[in-house]
Amino acid sequence: MDASTEDGSGSSSDDGRGQSEGSADELLAAVIGARSLFLMRRHRRNAAQRARRWRFVGSEAGRRPNRPRDFDQGMRGIMRDYFGVDGQPPVYGEDTFERRFRVPRSVFMRIYEAIRDRPFWRQSINATGRPQAHALQKLVAAFRVLAYGESYDRADEYVRLSKSTMKVATKKLIDFIVEEWEPIYLRPPNDEEVKRMLEHNAARVMSGCIGSLDCSHWEWAACPKGLAGQYQNRKKRRSVVMETVFNEDLYLWHFFIGAPGSLNDLNV
Amino acid sequence: MTSTCNASDRCIFDVVEGVWPLKFFSFCVNGRSRRLLYYLTDGVYPKHPFFVSPYPNPITPAEKSFNRLQEAPRKDVERLYGVMTARFHILLHPGRFGSVEQIMLAGKAAPILHNMVVEQRRGRYVAHERMAAVAAARDGEPAAAADDGHAVGAGDVGWACKTGNCAAAAGDVE
């Protein structure tokens, strides 16, 4: 644009030059105006982003540095206790493994194999070049929360992960399990299975029975106040109702959770 | 015909619409052929034809024996919640979740894990054969369920004790 106006001013008369100077000033004003507008918008956008930003953001001046948790120490402890290091047998055997994790080792390893290469779970290298926590550590931490029902901070001293990492790990494990295995493990039976169930129940005289149906309440400690009246059960506690249909070997064929605790069994 | 109830949350609606329970199976009771399958419940449920509840006040010997037979499979209900909450204590303690979606997801994950354990542990039941069929359908899926021994070493987890690297990493920590 500038080059063309200069060419035009060089070839044309004084009137044309005056016009072109005027247009150059206008152009300059327009450019300055546009730039200031752009800067203002960017400033506003950044300010809005700053206001909206998550509180727990990474490293910043004035923030507490990451605690020097020795991730490798936690991993070494887990390997020593349950998997064995350097050809040594693990400290705890199979029954202790199942008691602590509430699942057999084969189920645990199956979950681990499925989850180990997922984005959150795989071991990453952070900006300073140090390796972060191993996938097994996060899985063990999440299983501690599920199995013992303990707070996220509880297993910090053993697996060397912060409570926020453990919270994220638990949530991601729950999401993964439901997304991956709900179509397999919580689907209704097909004809073959119904036939088998009928045969099995016919041996127990109740022929034609396809399982038992029952409801139970799961108390909800952190129920929001807005839902408190809706979710209050007959014992004046907040709870959600779980409804199940299952076999005599305690295999669940149908599971429904989420009904407010104010509902009786027959409403669910 | 194989799976008439697709979304598991819709089971009651399927009952109302007559899709579920399945009516393709007939069985014989007292010399009569019947086709409506039923669930065992207790007395609090409404009197639907697919719910079989015990007599509230059994008087005749027939009623008493029916109650005894009905309660024999029915008692497992009380076991289920005991076993499941004992297995995953997250269901035992009051849930600390902020929304219904989160508590639903957490509540679903525990029964899924429970089912995985059950089909692993009790091989002679229906579930085991079903899972075998699923595995066969996916042909050649590495059956991790097969080995229950602890032949799992450090190499399987993909972690080796790197003492030298550990010391270097520990030195790097500010």
Image: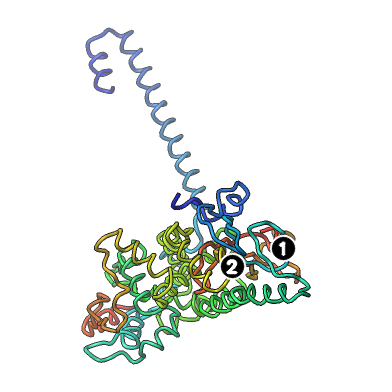
Callout 2: SS: strand
In-front residue for pair B174/A98: A98
Extreme-front residue of the structure: B31
Give the residue at mark 2. A212
* Mark number displayed over residue A202: none
Quarter occupied by residue A77:
bottom left
In-front residue for pair B152/B15: B15
Q: Position of residue A247 (x, y in %)?
A: 52, 69
Q: Subunit of mark 1? A: A
Q: Residue at 23%, 14% (x, y): give it.
A: A10
The quarter of the rendered structure image containing the C terminus of chain A is bottom right
Name the side, left or right, on which B23 lies relative to B161: right
Name the side, left or right, on which B135 lies relative to A55: left
Mark 1: give few (<14), some (14-19) or many (20+) Cα within 10 Å.
some
Q: Where is residue A267 in the image (x, y as percent from the top left)?
A: 70, 58
Q: Is residue A221 visible?
A: no
In-front residue for pair B123/A260: B123
Q: Can residue B28 be seen in this view?
A: yes
Name the side, left or right, on which A31 lies relative to B64: left
In-front residue for pair B23/A30: B23
Q: Which amino acid does label 2 sit on?
A: Ser
Q: Where is residue B15 in the image (x, y as percent from the top left)?
A: 60, 52
- Kindly check if marks 2 and 1 are in contact, taking CB atoms under 8 A apart as contact: no
Q: Of marks 2 and 1, which one's residue comes earlier in the chain? A: 2
The quarter of the rendered structure image containing the N terminus of chain A is top left
Q: Residue at 36%, 90% (x, y): give it.
A: A92
Q: Distance between the residues labelled 2 and 1?
A: 17 Å
Choose mark 2 or mark 1, whichever is in front: 2
Quarter occupied by residue A112:
bottom left
Q: What residue type is labelled 1?
A: Asn
Give the residue at mark 1. A264
